[in-house]
Amino acid sequence: MRQHLLNGWLVAALVATTCLLGVTAYAEVKEDISRIACTHEDKAPGGRSAEPDISAAARCDVRASGA
């Protein structure tokens, strides 16, 4: 009986660790994508100039001032 209880706690700890790892990885990737989007210049592939996205520039300015 004690072994069964310990196995249950072990599985619960493993599930909790996996969930925390997934949430952490998701948050890091989301932050990296935002940072990369803000650091790219406003150029389209092929060297042509693209129309600047004013709302994206505003979001990047807000992130830069808040950090």
Image (cartoon, rainbow, N blue to C red):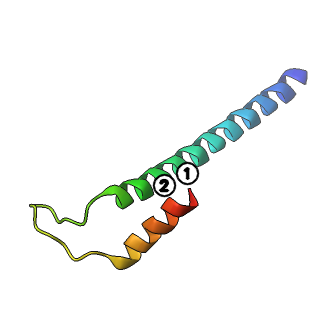
In the rendered structure, the answer to whether residue 15 lies left or right of residue 43 reads right
Which residue is at the far right? Answer: 1
What SS does tag 1 mark? Answer: helix
Q: Picture coordinates of residue 30 (x, y %)?
A: 48, 55
Q: Picture coordinates of residue 40 (x, y %)?
A: 29, 58
The C terminus lies in quadrant: bottom right
Residue lying at 64% horizontally and 44% vertically, measured from the top left: 19
- Above-or-below relation of 36 to 11: below
Task: Measure how far apart labels 1 and 2 are at the Cα level.
Answer: 5 Å
- Above-or-below relation of 18 to 58: above
Q: Amino acid at mark 1?
A: Ala
Q: Nearer the viewer, residue 6 or 41?
A: 41
| Few, some or many residues within 10 Å of mark 2 (<14, 14–19, 20+) | few
Q: Amino acid at mark 2?
A: Lys
The N terminus lies in quadrant: top right
Residue 30: image tag: 2
